[in-house]
Amino acid sequence: MFPWGLSCLSVLGAAGTAVLCAGLLLSLAQHLWTLRWMLSRDRASTLPLPKGSMGWPFFGETLHWLVQGSRFHSSRRERYGTVFKTHLLGRPVIRVSGAENVRTILLGEHRLVRSQWPQSAHILLGSHTLLGAVGEPHRRRRKVLARVFSRAALERYVPRLQGALRHEVRSWCAAGGPVSVYDAAKALTFRMAARILLGLRLDEAQCATLARTFEQLVENLFSLPLDVPFSGLRKGIRARDQLHQHLEGAISEKLHEDKAAEPGDALELIIHSARELGHEPSMQELKESAVELLFAAFFTTASASTSLVLLLLQHPPAIAKIREELVAQGLGRACGCAPGAAGGCVGAPPDCGCEPDLSLAALGSLRYVDCVVKEVLRLLPPVSGGYRTALRTFELDGYQIPKGWSVMYSIRDTHETAAVYRSPPEGFDPERFGAAREDSRGASSRFHYIPFGGGAGQRLARRLLAVELVRTARWELATPAFPAMQTVPIVHPVDGLRLFFHPLAPLVAGDGLCL
């Protein structure tokens, strides 16, 4: 018994020594990691680095960020202030919030900073995209995309977008059970982008398969830049390659179509515009452009559309005001056909013969609808911020921002702390964007509201959804309580927002306006 006891004590002592050594090594590694970034400050500047923590070696604070979501940034803002340092996704980052600080960053484009996304996003989306191009290629891409989302192009999209949204809302009403709004919005957004922007001819099964592949790409867009088995980046690369393989056949057909024909979709417009500028696009360039178009449509639209449905459900007076405005503008009469079967792909035969009745001009007259869409993006911006890279060392709020470091400006924190509105920032108040209040705030309020995903095409889709939803359906929770919101990497309800939808009788002047 005695030798056996000594053996146990020996093993326990060795284990304790190993644990102690491991702890000391970890502590030393973290100390050296912190020192490494302290020494990376620009010594030509007398200003200090912002306060903050660089986390653990290589991983930084990425795991904390993914687990804590929006609380990660708000807790550090409370502790360190509106400018602090951290280390995310393999890079040193300066996190910035507040209208004045954001103003410095956004107005310093190409002078103080340049647009920058995580390395994983560059790898997955490619160099022939707006976020990957620099110099002349970047300017050419902006010109082409400006034509894709010009007013004339948007006017052509309106009837098809309205038809797709009408079909979707009516299918929700006919579902016979709860609908997961976020999942439905993601599927719908992908189908609309694939059919209307890219002109892809997909049956229902192909739509679903390609949407799942694309979603896997998006889910791994913000991952550690480690191309190793089972890593997020490796999964994203596999999804990207599958998408490119499918797109190659469709693009090849478009390249061999009549060059003199009028472009029928956004991808054809990209090809046509590039040729007008004297540039023959390569297959790789067009595959990356196609994925970029899907990404631009999908990345924030599904999130913001789900948030729109959620916030309207939580604030019935806003629904009543939208219905009043629709009736006043002669747009209260929805499609009167009985809802058809759920499912189907955009471009499938319609299940009613009603003609689209909306246009850009008609949507432009719906001022309150526009205020609601803006307020949704203010309260629940789809993403927390935007990335930039410092082109040179500069001062911000008394700190140095070293050349080469990433700068992430915070949309959500800036919205939450804005003090220019007459009503509390945390409340839902679409009227804060009414003409009278915006005039009283003046130009100084410009950088208090900086929604990501507020592009013309996406605003159009959300306005159309608001109109079709309010004049076609009423909806209610299928769960005991409203869901919590996940904020990283995209804002969405943790349970997908499960709702029951019920059809409404068409609205006409004189009808009751309560749900």
Image (spheres, grey):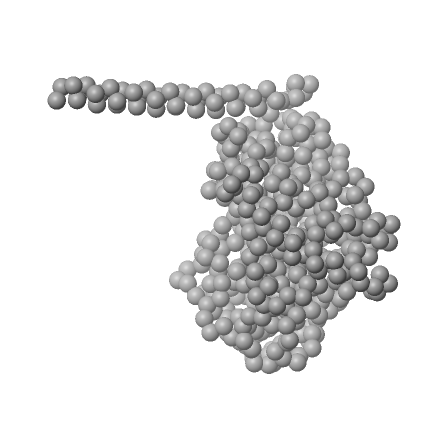
Q: Position of residue 305 (x, y in %)?
A: 58, 60
Q: Position of residue 1 (x, y in %)?
A: 12, 22
Outermost residue toward the left in this view: 1
The number of numbered badges drawn on the structure is: 0
Q: Position of residue 147 (x, y in %)?
A: 79, 56
Residue at 67% in and 34% down: 389
Depth order, front residue of 132/14: 14
Residue 71 visible in the snapshot: no
Residue 148 visible in the snapshot: yes
Report the side of 5 relative to 173 (left or right): left
Depth order, front residue of 446/500: 500
Residue 366 lies in quadrant: bottom right
- In the displayed structure, 356 sits above or below 16; it is below
Residue at 51% in and 33% down: 59
Residue 323 lies in quadrant: bottom right
Depth order, front residue of 119/172: 119
Residue at 58% in and 68% down: 204
Depth order, front residue of 342/14: 14
Residue at 66% in and 21% down: 42
Q: Position of residue 242 (x, y in %)?
A: 61, 53
- In the displayed structure, 424 sits above or below 339; it is above
- In the displayed structure, 175 sits above or below 111; it is below
